[in-house]
Image (spheres, helix red, strand yellow):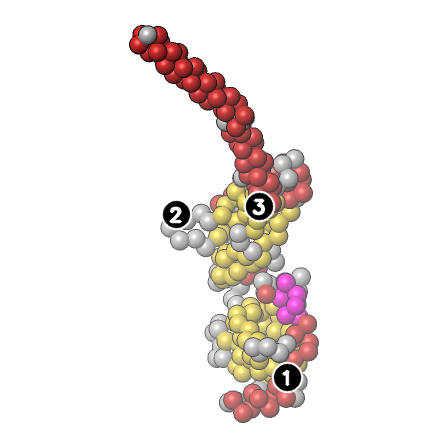
Amino acid sequence: MQIEVNAHKRTKQGTGASRRLRREGKTPGIVYGGKQPAVVIELDHNALYHQLRQEAFHASVLTLNLEGAKEQVLLRSVNMHPFRLEVQHIDFQRVLADVAIQMKVPLHFINAEQSPGVKLSGGIVSHVMSELQIRCLPADLPEFIEVDLKDMAIGATVHVKDLQLPKGVEVVLHGSENPPVAVVQIPRAMVADEAADAAVAEAAVAASEVPTSKQSAEPAAAEKGADKGGDKGEKKSEKSDKK
């Protein structure tokens, strides 16, 4: 998918000049890198804003059309207004066909509803990562990387090294790290229900093992009666001995 960005060279620089550009519906920017000097540019804000809403715009080699001269670039930085939907500044980096680039690309999770953990066990998929840092030549840069969840059971985890990467693409990792990408978990509500059921069952078992007040009172009363009877017998025997 080829995305073209139209831009013009900017003749004035500085905070005041940038502020005037924004009032005119334009966005200041810069393109740098490669074997050419950096060039300050300006772009139509509305066209740029709509392009930024495309996922591919953030993870693709773009064609920058700078007053008729076209070059391959990557989106490197976007500064947004703190609370308005306004792009305040944008940076592009030139790329060379024979030089590897590093880029974050989005992850697309597929076949979750077919996985045993979701379909049979009622689990839910928790996405630990939403994008992945990769390294490749510009021509090999994928728009996204798929994460296939069709074989995941409940409690299973997909790690970065489990992913099937496109040809020519490698993940940027440090040392022996292998972070998780997604996990199939039991929903919290289901865990809470199971805990509540277990508590009720334990309470029922405990109640069945404790004697009722009536049952405990009867042996006590019988024992008390026996004691009284014994006392009366002893008193009678004492009176007969006196006689």
In the rendered structure, which amino acid carries the disc numbered 3? Arg
CA separation, marks 3 and 2?
32 Å
> Which labelled disc corresponds to residue 26?
1
Q: Please report contact status of discs 3 and 2: CB closer than 8 Å, yes or no.
A: no
- Residue 67 pos. (x, y %): 64, 81
- Residue 196 pos. (x, y %): 57, 39
CA separation, marks 1 and 3?
48 Å
CA separation, marks 1 and 2?
46 Å
Q: State whether residue 38 is above or below residue 17.
A: above
Q: Nearer the viewer, residue 91 or 63?
A: 91
Of mark 3 and mark 2, the one earlier in the sequence is 2
Of mark 1 and mark 3, the one earlier in the sequence is 1
Of mark 1 and mark 2, the one earlier in the sequence is 1
- Residue 19 pos. (x, y %): 57, 89
Residue at the spot x=53%, y=52% of the render?
128
Residue range highlighted in magenta: 51-57
In the rendered structure, which amino acid carries the disc numbered 2? Ser
Mark 2 crowd level (few <14, some 14–19, many ≥20, 10 Å Cα): few
Where does label 2 land, which residue?
176
Is residue 220 visible to us here? yes
In the shown orientation, is residue 104 left or right of residue 65?
A: left
- Residue 147 pos. (x, y %): 59, 47
